[in-house]
Image: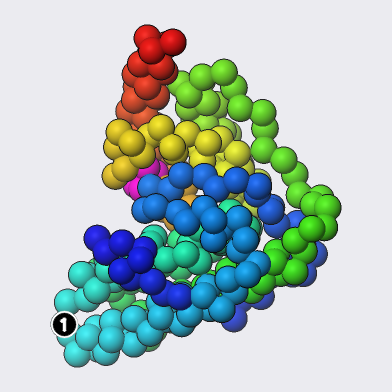
């Protein structure tokens, strides 16, 4: 994987009222996809040109993918590289922390493209998937710009829940939230289900990433995609409860692994002190 420095990349329009509630988080979380330039993120409002270049470069990768798909060539590796680059660029951290409402939309669009090219989708469907990626990236950038314009203003965004005493306890709360989300989906409450998934990712799982990344970065990256793309996309597509529960079961296994890691981390800390 290229580093952020080596690979420096320098529509859907959400309602203004919704974007106005975006979080202006005071500190940068740890990410499974690479190092975050915390100084840059702390002054993100000064780097809008850099973020625009990130978006433009990511979009430039789409045309070769579409041309290769139209010619019948394999595009799985190219899409995987696009996802890798999306995880590395500075706009990723800016959207995730300063424009959180739009963050799942980008992931869902990128994973949707990956599914389209690896499946039996025709050229028209793949092109439509690529357009969704472009729109989601520009939406995210626009939300970051709006957040930048509000720096210094009081935020009315809801705060994350107070963190519980231990990592394993947080995992149990995450699992309960996911169970509730799937139950809401089963009752036909799609918006409520998506809200629960997004909230538990932002307010609970993100706070655990720092400890987990040190031990198993692939686990963090996989769960990040499941929270922001795989599970919400299944629900949006109207998947059967069997398929949704299958994905939930896979997430549960990964989260239980994460719980074990966090227990070890906390045990190590207690031994030190």
Name the residue rendered at 24%, 60% in the picture. Answer: 1
Where is 117 relative to 255, above or below? below
Residue 158, quarter of the rendered image: top right
Which stretch appears magenta? 219-223
Residue nearer the viewer, 30 or 242 = 30
Residue nearer the viewer, 55 or 129 = 55
Name the residue rendered at 52%, 45% in the picture. Answer: 29
Q: Is residue 273 visible?
A: yes
Q: Is residue 249 visible?
A: no
Whether residue 80 appears in magenta in the rendering, the answer is no
Q: Name the spot of residue 240 as percent of width and height, x first.
A: 44, 49
Q: Name the spot of residue 57 as percent of width and height, x first.
A: 40, 80
Q: Which residue is mark 1?
A: 73
Residue 186, quarter of the rendered image: top right
Residue 197, quarter of the rendered image: top right
| Left or right of 261, for residue 190 | right
């Amino acid at each position: 994987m290229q580093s952020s420095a080596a690979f420096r990349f320098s529509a859907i329009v959400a309602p203004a009222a919704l974007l106005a509630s975006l979080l202006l988080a005071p500190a940068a979380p740890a990410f499974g996809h690479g190092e975050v330039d915390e100084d840059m993120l702390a002054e993100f409002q000064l780097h809008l040109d850099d973020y625009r270049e990130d978006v433009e470069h990511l979009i430039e990768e789409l045309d070769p993918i579409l041309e290769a798909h139209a010619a019948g060539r394999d595009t799985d590796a190219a899409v995987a590289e696009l996802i890798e680059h999306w995880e590395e660029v500075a706009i990723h951290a800016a959207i995730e922390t300063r424009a959180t409402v739009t963050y799942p939309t980008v992931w869902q669009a990128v994973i949707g493209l990956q599914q389209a090219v690896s499946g039996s989708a025709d050229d028209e469907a793949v092109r439509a998937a690529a357009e969704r990626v472009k729109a989601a990236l520009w939406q995210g950038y626009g939300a970051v710009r709006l957040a930048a314009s509000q720096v210094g203003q009081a935020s009315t965004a809801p705060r994350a829940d107070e963190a519980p005493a231990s990592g394993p306890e947080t995992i149990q709360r995450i699992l309960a939230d996911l169970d509730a989300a799937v139950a809401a989906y089963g009752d036909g409450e799609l918006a409520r289900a998506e809200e629960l998934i997004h909230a538990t990712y932002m307010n609970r799982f993100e706070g655990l990433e720092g400890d987990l990344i040190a031990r198993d970065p692939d686990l963090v990256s996989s769960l990040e995609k499941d929270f922001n793309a795989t599970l919400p996309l299944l629900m949006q597509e109207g998947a059967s409860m069997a398929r949704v529960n299958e994905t939930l079961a896979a997430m549960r296994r990964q989260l239980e692994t994460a719980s074990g890691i966090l227990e070890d981390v906390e045990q190590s800390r207690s031994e030190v002190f």
